[in-house]
Amino acid sequence: MTTEEKIFEAAFKVFQNKGFMGARMQEIADEAGINKAMLHYFFRSKEKLFEAVFMKAFGKLAPQINEIFNSDDDLFEKIRKFTASYITFVIEYPFLPQFIIQEMNNNPDFVEKFLKEEQRPNPIKLVKQIERAIELGEIMPLSPKQLLLDIFSMTVFPFAAQTLVKGIIAISDDEFIALMEARKVHISTQIINAIQKG
């Protein structure tokens, strides 16, 4: 394993356990088995390391999402697969949604760079599929963009506001994960029931 690979592995572990704010570069260096100077040689700051970790993790999610968006599956199956894939991913990388929100507020340049990535999820085919399903009378007339926003927000919000959610409904970390696992089916079922005809 190269030094850079060790750093990524260590950073994933520390960020996952401590989040971005709680993580320390010294802790990441210790976990990687290198000194702090070596860590700074590869990544000048915690922010730069986290951005690299984010893009590496997102590189695993984006192809899965695009495969779902561009597949020949019917619309309802795509909704089921998207919610399941996204929630599975964020359970594995729970620090990412909060980081995105933080960066949107503090580092718009990174967000702009992220949105220009060729591998970012592209829902164009899915939007056309929604429009076609409306034309055929398979689903209720609605805005495809509103539908996408509903799906994204229902899957993303509990993770982005995880501390708040746990506190308000008084659940432990393990109960939160169990609840999120159940949402894979809950969200898709709720959305499909709301938009389908008959």
Image (cartoon, rainbow, N blue to C red):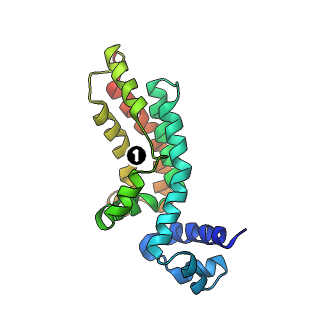
Q: Is residue 78 above or below residue 16?
A: above
Find disc 1 in the rendering and name its residue: 155
Quadrant where the C terminus lies? top left
Q: Is residue 91 above or below residue 128?
A: below
Quadrant where the N terminus lies? bottom right
Provide residue 20's location: percent of width, then percent of height.
44, 71
Task: Please say whether residue 181 is visible from this viewpoint.
Answer: no
Residue sitting at 65 percent across and 67 percent down? 5
Residue sitting at 50 percent across and 39 percent down? 66
Question: Is 162 or 176 nearer to us in this picture?
Answer: 162
For mark 1, does the 10 Å Cα neighbourhood hold few (<14), some (14 to 19), or many (20 or more) residues?
many
Residue sitting at 52 percent across and 64 percent down? 53
Q: Secondary structure at mark 1?
A: helix
Task: Please say whether residue 112 is visible from this viewpoint.
Answer: yes
What is the count of numbered marks?
Answer: 1
Question: Is 106 or 22 nearer to us in this picture?
Answer: 106
Q: Is residue 42 above or below residue 100?
A: below
Question: Is 173 or 59 nearer to us in this picture?
Answer: 59
Q: Amino acid at mark 1?
A: Thr
Residue sitting at 29 percent across and 64 percent down? 105
Provide residue 153's location: percent of width, then percent of height.
34, 46
Provide residue 88's location: percent of width, then percent of height.
53, 48
Can you name the residue that lies furthest to the right here? 1
Question: Is 55 or 84 nearer to us in this picture?
Answer: 55
